[in-house]
Amino acid sequence: MAQVDAQPALIDDLFNCPPAYNAILACLSPADIIRAGKTCRLLRDAVESFNSLAYNINRHLEHFLADPIAFRRLQAKGDFLISGSNALQFLDRTFYLGSDLDIFAYPDTVKEIGQHLIDKEGYVFEPGEKQAKSFEDVKVKKQDLSSLGRSHSQAEFVYNSGMSDLLRFKHPRRDLEIQLIGCRRTPLDCVLYFHSTCVMNIITHDAAYALYPKATFDKRISLQFGYDSHERTKKAFDKYSERGWSFFTDLTAEGVRSIESSIATDITRYLDDKFTWRLPLDTGGLDLDEDSKSKTIAFQCNSWRLNRDFNGFSTQMTLGIAYQVFPSRSLEQTYLVAEKEFGDAIDQLIDYLEVYNPSRRTRKYLDSYLPDLRDAHHKYTKRVYEET
């Protein structure tokens, strides 16, 4: 009996001692840490304390930036994303020697971001063969504001799709490189066109998101897009295989069923849904106002689907990410919309507010209405504004 009674006391001692529980939690995967935090209040508090240390975004960015706070203030203003291997390293609590920092930005913010890296961080612009030698003379391609349906799967070439400009910045004294990518449509569109799901992770100014966390951090598998016969795509697959990910290729009905719970097929996904891992970040020093917080909530209304597609009589299916790119002069950001009906609802709301709502004249953008509209769209299957 004494041995049974001693076990809870030991757990209580361990998880009330930060050095002890930090050492234990550091050995666990992100998925196991989340599970531990759900067991009891004691471990929940320990996990929250550990996460505040393990996921210190300012310390993470200090590898590339002397002043991460100033950079994140600029990020809050310009809505650009950190993604690629850097976001994966942050969420996986690991480090890849020689990896760079990838920034995905709207075209109208590229020059300001690049100038910040030069003036405030001391980086030097490294022009490509066809680029202007001086960053001041670089011409950034404008954003494509056309509405467009996007879909890609294993049978298509996807490498670099959605990117319009790639600008490289080198540190003069350290072996560091920052890649600034101008996005043809939206930063998130570029991320969803990556070569595989293990790198579909993003860092904003106030949160980090893993779009496929169970597959990436629990099962350590990645669903590939594009064909590996292309040299650059195969090189990317090989690189992440060496880093510990297995690429899932059994696209039979039984094979896909075996990973169904990890990839969430045939449903509309959002950045704040139960399948996404959203990790809030410390925003101290960013001086965020209510508009910034409102933009974050609206940003989470971006949506996409991972659809199954059976190819005739073949035993293999394809899995493709699909959505509509939805730009509007009444929205500050360009959104990805997985359901046509929700896109129609946004159009109708904008038309109504612009014509009939007097308060519209005092508000330039209508992004803040999107979360409530999304909730109403899901609650009422037949909308009251539907034309008869």
Image (cartoon, rainbow, N blue to C red):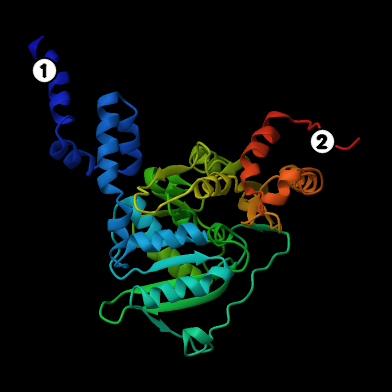
Picture coordinates of residue 280 (x, y %)? 40, 44
Instruction: Report if the CB atoms under discs 2 and 1 are less than 8 Å apart.
Output: no
Q: Mark yes or no: residue 83 visible.
A: no
Give the residue type that dot 1 points to: Ala
Closer-to-camera residue (200/131): 131
Picture coordinates of residue 73 (x, y %)? 42, 59
Position of the C terminus, as image quadrant, is: top right
Query: Circle 2 is placed at which residue position?
Result: 385
* Disc 1: CA contacts within 10 A as few (<14), some (14-19) or many (>=20): few
**Separation of disc 2 and disc 1 at Cα?**
64 Å
Image-quadrant location for residue 242: bottom left
Task: Give the secondary structure at mark 1.
Answer: helix
Q: Residue at x 67, y 47 (%)?
A: 338
Closer-to-camera residue (216/209): 209
Position of the N terminus, as image quadrant, is: top left
Task: Determine whether 299 is above or below 124 in the image.
Answer: above
Q: Residue at x 26, y 29 (%)?
A: 43
Task: Give the secondary structure at mark 2.
Answer: loop
Q: Mark yes or no: residue 68 visible.
A: yes
Q: Residue at x 25, y 26 (%)?
A: 42
- Could you say which disc has been placed on residue 6 in the image? 1
Give the residue type that dot 2 points to: Tyr
Picture coordinates of residue 50 (x, y %)? 25, 41
Pointer 2 or 1: first along the chain: 1
